[in-house]
Image (tube, rainbow, N blue to C red):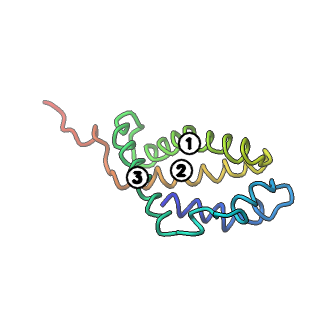
């Protein structure tokens, strides 16, 4: 689900701003659209989606593992997990790859970080909905 949302935000809705913008780094454009081999997402979509699904399963296992420490309630729990993903994944990725390696302008990195908020919020909410009630909510009180 997160992969679908990110592709819509980054490569559909965000395409004019991120990839058709004169301020964008030539290196970003070259790596994504010109240099061979092209990214896997463009050359072998099914394999790319399969790998993304495996990553989603791993995120689901992490969610299960830390669920007792997350806030109660499906929405709060999902958004909290999304915030954790954003802090641990998106910030590092955007700094290390687009900004550091490809010279992407700070303003475009900031736009991408906002897109990531939506991506990981959806992922956290979907995992929270799938998970259902929290473990502490399922335990029956001792009388």
Q: Which residue is mark 2?
A: 120
Q: Residue at x 24, y 43 (%)?
A: 138
The reply to whether callout 2 and callout 3 are in contact (CB within 8 Å) is no
Horizontally, residue 96 falls left or right of residue 127, namely right
Residue 40 at x, y = what percent? Answer: 56, 63
Residue that numbered label 1 is attached to = 89
| Image depth: mark 1 or mark 3 in front | 1
**Earlier-in-chain disc, 1 versus 3:** 1
For label 1, the SS is: helix
43 or 127: nearer the eye? 43
- According to the picture, the residue beneath numbered tag 3 turns out to be 127
* Residue that extends furthest to the front in the rendered view of this protein: 36
> Do residues under tags 1 and 2 come within 8 Å of each other at their CB atoms?
yes
Query: Which is nearer the N-term, disc 1 or disc 2?
Result: 1
Q: Residues within 10 Å of mark 1 (few under 14, many from 20)?
A: few
Q: In 3D space, how far apart are the residues under numbered discs 1 and 2 (Cα atoms)? A: 10 Å
Mark 2 crowdedness (10 Å alpha carbons): few <14, some 14-19, many ≥20: many
Within-10-Å neighbours for mark 3: few <14, some 14–19, many 20+: many
Tag in front: 1 or 2: 1
How far across and how far down the image is residue 78, in percent? 45, 47
Query: What's the distance in space between the residues labelled 2 and 3, CA to CA?
Result: 10 Å
């Amino acid at each position: 689900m997160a992969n679908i949302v990110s592709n819509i935000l980054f490569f559909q809705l965000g395409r004019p701003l991120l990839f058709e913008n004169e301020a964008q780094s030539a290196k970003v454009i070259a790596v994504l659209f010109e240099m061979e081999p092209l990214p896997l997402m463009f050359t072998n979509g099914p394999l790319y989606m399969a790998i993304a699904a495996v990553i989603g399963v791993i995120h689901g296992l992490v969610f299960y593992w830390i669920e007792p420490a997350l806030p109660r309630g499906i929405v709060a729990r999902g958004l909290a997990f999304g915030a954790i993903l954003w802090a641990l994944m998106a910030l590092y990725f955007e700094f290390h790859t687009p900004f550091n390696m490809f010279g992407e302008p700070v303003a475009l990195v900031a736009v991408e970080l906002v897109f990531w908020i939506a991506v990981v919020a959806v992922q956290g909410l979907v995992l929270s909905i799938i998970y259902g009630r929290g473990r502490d909510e399922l335990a029956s009180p001792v009388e």
